[in-house]
Image (cartoon, rainbow, N blue to C red):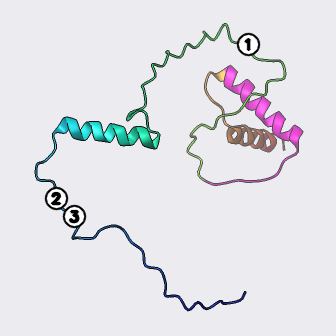
Protein backbone atom coordinates (compact mmCIF):
# COMPACT_ATOMS: atom_id res chain seq x y z
CA UNK A 1 0.00 0.00 0.00
CA UNK A 2 1.36 3.37 -0.94
CA UNK A 3 1.30 6.36 1.38
CA UNK A 4 0.20 9.47 -0.45
CA UNK A 5 1.23 12.70 1.24
CA UNK A 6 -0.95 15.69 0.69
CA UNK A 7 0.11 19.29 0.94
CA UNK A 8 -3.38 20.24 2.13
CA UNK A 9 -3.94 20.45 5.89
CA UNK A 10 -6.11 17.85 7.53
CA UNK A 11 -9.85 18.67 7.52
CA UNK A 12 -11.32 19.71 10.85
CA UNK A 13 -14.58 18.28 12.12
CA UNK A 14 -17.35 20.72 12.81
CA UNK A 15 -20.16 19.88 15.20
CA UNK A 16 -21.90 23.23 14.73
CA UNK A 17 -21.42 24.06 18.39
CA UNK A 18 -20.18 27.59 17.97
CA UNK A 19 -20.90 29.30 21.24
CA UNK A 20 -21.57 32.61 19.50
CA UNK A 21 -24.59 31.21 17.64
CA UNK A 22 -26.06 29.41 20.65
CA UNK A 23 -28.64 31.13 22.75
CA UNK A 24 -30.76 29.26 25.29
CA UNK A 25 -34.50 29.52 24.88
CA UNK A 26 -35.92 32.44 26.80
CA UNK A 27 -39.06 30.55 27.85
CA UNK A 28 -39.24 26.84 28.57
CA UNK A 29 -41.62 25.19 26.09
CA UNK A 30 -44.79 23.60 27.39
CA UNK A 31 -45.12 19.87 27.82
CA UNK A 32 -47.52 19.63 24.87
CA UNK A 33 -45.07 21.41 22.55
CA UNK A 34 -42.25 19.10 23.61
CA UNK A 35 -44.45 16.02 23.14
CA UNK A 36 -45.53 17.19 19.68
CA UNK A 37 -41.90 17.83 18.68
CA UNK A 38 -40.90 14.34 19.89
CA UNK A 39 -43.70 12.76 17.84
CA UNK A 40 -42.68 14.71 14.71
CA UNK A 41 -39.05 13.64 15.05
CA UNK A 42 -40.11 10.05 15.74
CA UNK A 43 -42.29 9.93 12.62
CA UNK A 44 -39.48 11.35 10.47
CA UNK A 45 -37.13 8.69 11.84
CA UNK A 46 -39.58 5.88 11.12
CA UNK A 47 -40.81 5.19 14.65
CA UNK A 48 -44.58 4.98 14.70
CA UNK A 49 -45.27 3.76 18.24
CA UNK A 50 -43.47 4.21 21.53
CA UNK A 51 -44.72 0.97 23.08
CA UNK A 52 -45.42 -2.30 21.32
CA UNK A 53 -49.09 -3.25 21.50
CA UNK A 54 -49.83 -5.93 24.07
CA UNK A 55 -51.11 -9.15 22.59
CA UNK A 56 -53.73 -11.04 24.51
CA UNK A 57 -52.62 -14.64 24.63
CA UNK A 58 -55.21 -17.34 24.61
CA UNK A 59 -54.90 -19.83 27.45
CA UNK A 60 -53.11 -23.06 26.61
CA UNK A 61 -55.54 -25.94 26.41
CA UNK A 62 -54.04 -29.34 27.18
CA UNK A 63 -56.13 -32.35 26.19
CA UNK A 64 -56.70 -35.01 28.84
CA UNK A 65 -54.20 -37.89 28.97
CA UNK A 66 -56.80 -40.35 27.68
CA UNK A 67 -57.06 -38.38 24.43
CA UNK A 68 -53.30 -38.33 23.85
CA UNK A 69 -52.02 -41.29 21.90
CA UNK A 70 -48.42 -42.34 21.58
CA UNK A 71 -47.15 -43.64 18.25
CA UNK A 72 -45.99 -47.26 18.03
CA UNK A 73 -42.35 -46.26 17.48
CA UNK A 74 -42.35 -43.91 20.50
CA UNK A 75 -39.27 -44.46 22.65
CA UNK A 76 -39.82 -44.00 26.37
CA UNK A 77 -37.36 -41.51 27.85
CA UNK A 78 -36.01 -42.35 31.28
CA UNK A 79 -36.00 -39.62 33.88
CA UNK A 80 -33.39 -39.80 36.59
CA UNK A 81 -34.63 -39.93 40.15
CA UNK A 82 -32.58 -38.91 43.20
CA UNK A 83 -31.37 -42.12 44.79
CA UNK A 84 -28.66 -41.12 47.23
CA UNK A 85 -26.03 -42.81 45.10
CA UNK A 86 -22.99 -40.58 44.84
CA UNK A 87 -20.28 -42.73 43.27
CA UNK A 88 -20.15 -42.13 39.49
CA UNK A 89 -20.10 -45.03 37.06
CA UNK A 90 -19.66 -44.27 33.38
CA UNK A 91 -19.23 -46.95 30.74
CA UNK A 92 -20.12 -47.81 27.18
CA UNK A 93 -22.74 -50.49 26.60
CA UNK A 94 -24.14 -52.25 23.60
CA UNK A 95 -27.46 -50.83 22.54
CA UNK A 96 -29.33 -54.03 23.33
CA UNK A 97 -27.82 -54.17 26.84
CA UNK A 98 -28.86 -50.59 27.53
CA UNK A 99 -32.37 -51.26 26.17
CA UNK A 100 -32.64 -54.39 28.35
CA UNK A 101 -31.68 -52.45 31.49
CA UNK A 102 -34.17 -49.71 30.61
CA UNK A 103 -36.96 -52.23 29.96
CA UNK A 104 -36.23 -53.93 33.30
CA UNK A 105 -36.29 -50.59 35.09
CA UNK A 106 -39.58 -49.64 33.39
CA UNK A 107 -41.26 -52.94 34.27
CA UNK A 108 -40.05 -52.73 37.90
CA UNK A 109 -41.30 -49.15 38.07
CA UNK A 110 -44.76 -50.27 36.96
CA UNK A 111 -44.79 -53.27 39.32
CA UNK A 112 -43.59 -51.40 42.40
CA UNK A 113 -45.41 -48.13 41.71
CA UNK A 114 -42.29 -46.05 42.28
CA UNK A 115 -39.40 -44.98 40.06
CA UNK A 116 -36.71 -47.66 39.85
CA UNK A 117 -33.41 -46.28 38.60
CA UNK A 118 -31.01 -47.94 36.19
CA UNK A 119 -28.46 -48.15 39.00
CA UNK A 120 -30.93 -50.07 41.15
CA UNK A 121 -31.49 -52.56 38.33
CA UNK A 122 -27.73 -53.12 38.08
CA UNK A 123 -27.44 -53.47 41.87
CA UNK A 124 -30.27 -56.02 42.00
CA UNK A 125 -28.78 -58.05 39.15
CA UNK A 126 -25.39 -58.14 40.94
CA UNK A 127 -27.12 -59.39 44.10
CA UNK A 128 -28.84 -62.15 42.11
CA UNK A 129 -25.54 -63.15 40.48
CA UNK A 130 -23.88 -63.35 43.90
CA UNK A 131 -26.71 -65.54 45.23
CA UNK A 132 -26.44 -67.80 42.20
CA UNK A 133 -22.74 -68.46 42.76
Q: Quadrant of the C terminus?
A: top right
Mark 3, other Cα within 10 Å: few <14 / some 14–19 / many ≥20 = few
Q: Quadrant of the N terminus?
A: bottom right
Q: Is residue 41 or residue 61 the one in the foreground?
A: 41
On whether residue 72 falls in the magenta region, the answer is: no
Q: Are marks 2 and 3 in contact (CB under 8 Å)?
A: yes
The numbered mark, 2 or 1, whose residue comes first in the sequence reads 2
Mark 1 to mark 3 CA distance (whole Å):
75 Å
Q: Are marks 1 and 3 in contact (CB under 8 Å)?
A: no
The image position of residue 84, as x and y in percent, is 55, 45
Name the residue at 87% across, 41% down.
Answer: 95
Name the residue at 21% across, 70% down.
Answer: 20
Q: Is residue 124 or residue 110 the one in the foreground?
A: 110
Name the residue at 29% across, 41% down.
Answer: 37
Q: Which residues are magenta?
A: 87-111
Query: What residue sits right under mark 3 in the picture?
Result: 22
Mark 2 to mark 3 CA distance (whole Å):
7 Å
Mark number, residue 24:
2
Report the mark closest to the observer, 1 or 3. 3
The numbered mark, 1 or 3, whose residue comes first in the sequence reads 3
Image check: 67 left or right of 17? right
On whether residue 104 falls in the magenta region, the answer is: yes
Amino acid sequence: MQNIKSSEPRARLSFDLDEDDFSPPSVEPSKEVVEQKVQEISKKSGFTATVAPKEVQAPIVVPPVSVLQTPADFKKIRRRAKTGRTYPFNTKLKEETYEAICMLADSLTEKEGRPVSLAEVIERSIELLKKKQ
